[in-house]
Amino acid sequence: METKEKEKTLLEQGLELPLMEEFYTIQGEGFHSGKPAYFIRVGGCDVGCHWCDVKESWDASLHPPTKVDDIVTNAIQYPGKAVVVTGGEPSMYNLDYITAQLKSKGIETFIETSGAYNLTGQWDWVCLSPKKTSPPLKDNFAKANELKIIVHNKSDFEWAEKNAAQVTPSCKLFLQPEWSKAKEMMPLIVEYVMAHPEWNVSLQTHKYMNIP
């Protein structure tokens, strides 16, 4: 019991995170697509997107609490000086410590989040990807540098505009086809973006490149 309590305390302090995986790759989506970055994927998510391609991340108990200092040590070994924290849903955790440590090492900090929880940490770039099952907290819209809407069906264009109305004018807007519906949705996205040029197209380019 003592060990469990200690782990809980370390998680609450942000000194440990339930690490699912970490790897150095090329950012595949959104505004920073094509740039090298170290990805830190944390376990735990209750947003429940039926089309999620990393459902193994949902159960945090499957992913061992890992010392943040060790994660940072791994991240700074690579030539790319950007870290993307993703999930799961990373905003479920206290990210103050990990971002402070990364920034002290000269690393840019990016996060990909649904915004369903209060966002902690110091971020150079916040990619907000709202989900209908658990919409973002109101305060998180103002923090978004990038709004990325996953388009699974035609109604998602209306959902996209509803969220775009809540971000700041400087926020970059992206529409991205859900991978299994890409062939069906891509022509609709292209047509929509051409008619609404404030939006941009995002693709999961890493899947085309066969990289993580």
Image (cartoon, grey):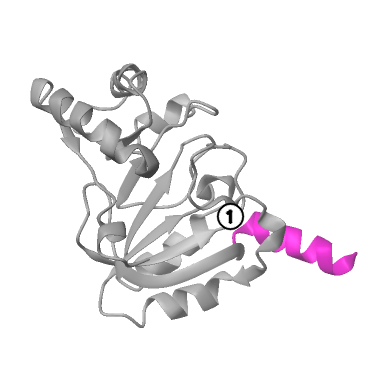
The residue tagged with tag 1: helix, strand or loop?
helix
Q: Residue, x 31% and y 58% (percent of image)?
A: 207
Q: Position of residue 83 (x, y in %)?
A: 36, 64
Q: Residue, x 25% and y 27% (percent of image)?
A: 168
Q: How many marks?
A: 1
Side of 92 where 171 appears, left or right: left
Looking at the image, residue 90 lies above or below residue 25: above
Q: Position of residue 3 (x, y in %)?
A: 83, 69
Q: Is residue 5 magenta?
A: yes
Side of 31 where 77 appears, left or right: right
In the figure, residue 18 lies in which quadrant? bottom right
Q: Position of residue 73 (x, y in %)?
A: 45, 80
Q: Amino acid at mark 1?
A: Ser
Residue 144 visible, this orientation? no
The residue that mark 1 highlights is 57
Residue 57 visible, this orientation? yes
Nearest the viewer among 163 and 12 is 163
Q: Is residue 122 magenta?
A: no
